[in-house]
Image (spheres, rainbow, N blue to C red):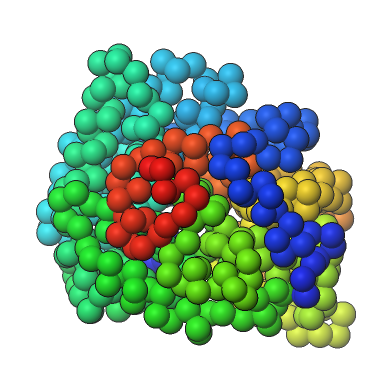
Amino acid sequence: MDRRRFLMGSTVAGVGALGLAGCAAVPGAPWAGGGAMDPEVEELQERTFRWFVDTTNRSNGLTPDRWPRKTFASIAAVGFALTCWPIGVERGWMTREEARERTLITARFFHDAPQGPEPTGVTGHKGFFYHFLDMETGLRYRDTELSTVDTALLLGGMLYAAQWFDGDHPEEVEIRRLVQAIYERVDWSFVVVRPNRISMGWRPERDFVRADWNKYNEGMLVLLLAMGSPTHPLPAAIWDEWCSVYDQSWTDEYGPQHLHFAPMFGHQYSHMFVDFRGIHDAFMRSKQAEIPGFDYFQNSVRAVQAQRKYAIDNPMGWAGYSADVWGLTACDGPGGFKQVIDGRERQFFSYSARGPGERDDGTLAPTAALGSMPFAPTEVIACMKAMKARYGAGIYTEYGFLDAFNPTLASTENPLQHGRIVPGVGWVDGDYLGIDQGPIVIQIENHRTDAVWKRMRHEPNIVRGLKVAGFTGGWLDNA
């Protein structure tokens, strides 16, 4: 799956399959080291945060899909930016006044932006928004689709902002009012084209995207927001249908048993906004006898273990893969071409969703590991340090890590679609991607202070959606 279009045994290197269960059992408690953080992680988080500050359009709140290449705005990246502003305030990197101003500009823009079925001159339709928008006008960019998952990620950031800006200041009151209005006008029934399934998107020229949210991936947030809507709610059957195909994803092929989705972003995106620790739907309750303490959070813990095991095993023999250098997800790549390297023909890709056993071309994305910070902090920090030590001269810059790099491709005569060859490093992307920068800032903070999860445990729309889906236990029983 390409998210930009529609989207071992019991232990691995000392991390047990349930090795984080003790931390997970106490929602709200800081993790591994509490609020204190390794200074290199702190520096990375701030550098990555600064990317959002410096690239987001101050006049309309739109954040670019990528930079420095000039392109278009990504509505998911906007949702991530909205989540980053309060983090910046709590870290002392931004004043509350600036964060409030930026948030209100964004909320006003999306609240007032034109909606309608026309193919041009609008920002969205039926409450949803187009995946990509013109950075200046905010109107639909070319023929991009009306995206359900990117709308959900935008809403995730908005709902977090509404929870965080909880003061009596008139602008904070307005933020809360606008965000709830934006959320309530989303007509979720519009995108239910096939029984009990939400379509990934719609285009006025070609009607609905043929793919639905009907397998384990990043789409959990889409379904939860749809079921939690106070104005256009979808029934619990949506979640039942979602879970009905889990047997196709349940595997131990790449590590301990878990719901497998190859690119790491599928195990991160919904988890950025929803604290799945200690809460269980019917499927997770059914797994308790087999795997005590298992939940969707622990599933992501195991997904990290699987990614590290795959890098250690390195079945395709790519340069650089190891216990400390790992991480496959959707990201840029060198381009679509084949090349013989050390007597072996290699296939490379441009932008693609990569994972264990899926379009692995030797391209590593720092966000795959760093956006997984809460799931395996010791291993993620080791990965960050190893990437900096070995490849930092080419991949670590003013705004943190560039999107991706490939140590195997040390030279080429093929035309590169992205980036350049850096001597001693290999291929290195030339851009930062907003949807890959966001998980780094947000998930580091969830690990450090529980910041986003803490607020979202009190977000009534999310709570309502979880309960409709049949989740019980943990913090949810008191919500």
Q: Is residue 431 left or right of residue 317?
A: left
Foreground: 143 or 236? Answer: 236
Q: Position of residue 402 (x, y in %)?
A: 66, 48
Foreground: 156 or 470? Answer: 470
Q: Residue at x 23, y 79 (%)?
A: 194
Q: Is residue 256 left or right of residue 219?
A: right
Q: Residue at x 50, y 84 (%)?
A: 248
Q: Position of residue 21 (x, y in %)?
A: 67, 54
Q: Is residue 39 left or right of residue 194?
A: right
Image-quadrant location for residue 333:
bottom right
Foreground: 186 or 425? Answer: 186
Quadrant where the C terminus is found in the figure: top left
Residue 340 in view, yes or no: no
Is 339 rendered above or below residue 323? below
Residue 161 in view, yes or no: yes
Image-quadrant location for residue 97:
top left
Q: Residue at x 36, y 56 (%)?
A: 466
Image-quadrant location for residue 191:
bottom left
